[in-house]
Image (cartoon, rainbow, N blue to C red):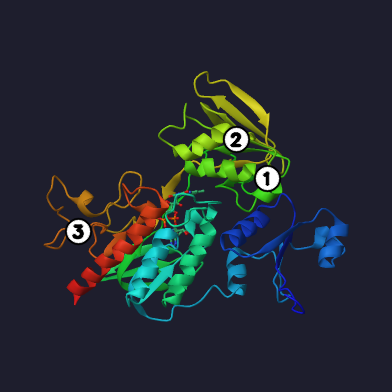
Amino acid sequence: MTGQKQPRRVRLLGLAESSEAYELRDFLQRSVVAFDWIELHGDADCQRELGLPQLANARLPVVELPDGTRLEAPTLHALADRLGWVTQPRLKEYDVSIYGAGPAGLSAAVYAASEGLRAVVIEKHAIGGQAGSSSLIENYMGFPGGISGAELCERGRQQAVGFGVEILMMREGVKAEFKNGKIIADLADGSTMTARANICATGVEWRRLGLSNEARYLGRGLYYGAGMSEAPLCRDEQVFIVGGANSAGQAAMYLAEYAAKVLLLVRGPTFKGTMSSYLYDRILTHPKIDVQFNTEVTDLQGDNALARIGLTDVNSKVTKWIEASRLFVCIGGLPNTEWAKDTPIVRDASGFLITGPDLLEHGLMPQYWPLKRQPYHLETSVPGSFAVGDVRAGSVKRLATAVGEGGMAVTFVHKHLQEAI
Ligand SMILES: Cc1cc2nc3c(=O)[nH]c(=O)nc-3n(C[C@H](O)[C@H](O)[C@H](O)COP(=O)(O)OP(=O)(O)OC[C@H]3O[C@@H](n4cnc5c(N)ncnc54)[C@H](O)[C@@H]3O)c2cc1C
């Protein structure tokens, strides 16, 4: 490009050990917003970058938008709002409301809107869900060179919006009521959402280590997930990853591109049965990645930020301390189904939503099921309310199945709406 001014990128400025800055970095990265992270170390940096004489008086982190707007210590909601992503629903009632804009929800949105349904997606955080934190997805059909999860989901978002779906960001479904054949959901911001059918695609949230002082280090050396936004900051460091499944394996491969050394801590004795073989073959031969099996992280220490971790051998129970300033926890997820707690929707012991044939008791329809027909394959115990992707009990926790189920649920939504006429 000649003679044309390059558009300025978003600038994010803050302190190294700030969990608020981490939260903003993670959100921008997942949302595929190009940005520069500028770490401030003292008054001179503050004067040069922000024109403020003293670091102590600056309200950090600061986000500077390409139009020159400066947001001081913004919440994620304030940032999303300023980027124009927080909108009001256009309709009073929709044909289908879809909760969650991960791969399953976005796929449902694309099919619903392209087939003429008045569809709305409600997303509590960033577009892309778990997939948004994946650096490179290599087993999704159609992308032989792999694709980053955030980019794939951003394409899905554009496609869904192109077909006319409404996406309401930074909104969370917290309670649901089923009345007169409609679902009326309470959202966390106090508003309500009414639809004739709904698809729950709320996925799972990272499982915590369960250590008493974990929250203290979150964003200050301790991260849940693959650390997409943090990887470039790990140059020449040794980093630690907990987990033995694909998400931990991908995180190891990705972080190894930047870090000097990656130590993967695995509780089990092997990767077999938990990680895809193509991935563990690469990990076990990677010059920068070491694997320690039979190991659990049992303690965390540090003042302002994580400095040491306690590693316990699961067989001998002996604990060793090791210096560690970055620990990425990738140990699976828990379902986001609190909203279903006081509804007739049946969940399994772990909170996943039970659907279709799994609702039958000894081959017979359960007593609480009100219709003559059996529940459709992805239908919960409430007619017209569907569950897809990782939140569904017994689902295969994979991108392709989440996408497939999202599209398939729309077929059942049509059938349900036909019945309701
Ligand atoms: C790091 C990583 C790497 C992975 N790599 C692969 C891979 O290579 N191949 C593969 O096949 N699979 C992979 N997976 C698994 C795959 O990403 C998941 O199976 C897939 O994302 C599940 O999609 P989902 O839409 O069901 O749920 P999620 O992706 O979990 O999305 C759920 C969405 O719902 C939102 N939400 C939750 N509660 C609410 C609420 N109450 N109201 C509104 N919104 C809500 C969340 O914010 C989130 O955006 C990976 C997962 C991770 C974490």
Task: Rate crowding at label 3 as few (under 14), some (14 to 19) or many (20 or more) other CA atoms within 10 Å.
Answer: many
Q: Quadrant of the N terminus?
A: bottom right
Q: Secondary structure at mark 3?
A: loop
Distance of mark 2 from mark 1, alpha carbons? 13 Å
Percent position (x, y) of residue 152? 50, 61
Quadrant in which residue 299 is drawn: top right
Image position of 117 with respect to 347: above or below? below
Amino acid type of the residue that numbered disc 1 sits on in the rendered structure: Tyr
Residue found 26% across the figure and 54% down from its top: 355
Q: Is residue 208 visible?
A: no
Image position of 300 with respect to 198: above or below? above
Image position of 214 with respect to 417: above or below? above
Percent position (x, y) of residue 367? 14, 54
For label 3, the residue is 375
Q: Quadrant of the C terminus?
A: bottom left
Q: How many callouts does the rendering have?
A: 3
Distance of mark 3 from mark 1, alpha carbons? 49 Å
Name the residue nearer the viewer: 371 or 158.
Answer: 158
For label 1, the residue is 258
Amino acid type of the residue that numbered disc 3 sits on in the rendered structure: Pro
User: Contact (CB < 8 A) between labels 3 and 2?
Assistant: no
Label at residue 286: 2
Distance of mark 3 from mark 2, alpha carbons? 48 Å
Amino acid type of the residue that numbered disc 2 sits on in the rendered structure: His
Q: Secondary structure at mark 2?
A: loop
Name the residue nearer the viewer: 324 or 256.
Answer: 256
Percent position (x, y) of residue 47? 86, 63
